[in-house]
Amino acid sequence: MYPALKYVEDLRVMSVHELFNRVFQLLTRFDAERQINHLKTLSEYALTEHQFAQLIGRSRLYNYLPQKQKKEIEKLPLSDTQVSVVAKDYYQDKSFCRSEDGDIDMWKVYNLFTSSAKSSYIDTFLGRNAGSLMFISHLINHLKSSGQSWYMS
């Protein structure tokens, strides 16, 4: 879905010149208009408190699944500790917490995910943030189509 993620995950270089070339490739392949339009659509979808609780619970289970089952499920971009931060901020974050009725739109969920990823080491930070958008997009596809998502079943 997001080809730029492939370049973020594999940005290893041996020289300054190679670094310059790889960063240039990354920037020239980035489609800002597409990205902005995609981010705008996140607020059009929301999770109920029950769905959010299900998402958090399943996310906590993800790391303990057998490898075979993990391969069949959308990859969770956050660590167990970061999922706990998302759960805490669902109630406490001043800008991106739930609404009065417990619902939370996917723009806010995305921001909770990326905020919790700030604690990542620098070598995993970009991948976790890009992965967060892909993960949220997966959940939105589930909401749009009433399809199956392991996290929301």
Image (cartoon, rainbow, N blue to C red):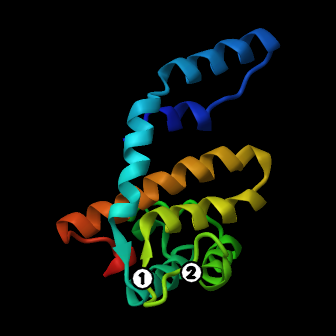
x and y, in percent, of residue 147 in the image: 20, 69
Quadrant of the drawing holding the N terminus: top left
Tag of residue 61: none
The answer to whether 102 appears left or right of 78 in the picture is: left
Q: Quadrant of residue 142?
A: bottom left
From the viewer's perspective, is residue 96 above or below residue 91?
Answer: above
Q: Is residue 72 visible?
A: no
The answer to whether 129 appears left or right of 62 in the picture is: right
Of circles 2 and 1, the one toward us is: 1
Q: Nearer the viewer, residue 141 or 57?
A: 141
Disc with the residue nearer the chain's start (2 vs 1) = 2
- Mark 1 surroundings within 10 Å by alpha-carbon count, few (fewer than 14), some (14 through 19), many (20 or more): some
| Residue identified by numbered label 2 | 60
Helix, strand or loop under label 2: helix
**Amino acid beneath label 2:** Arg
| Residue identified by numbered label 1 | 103
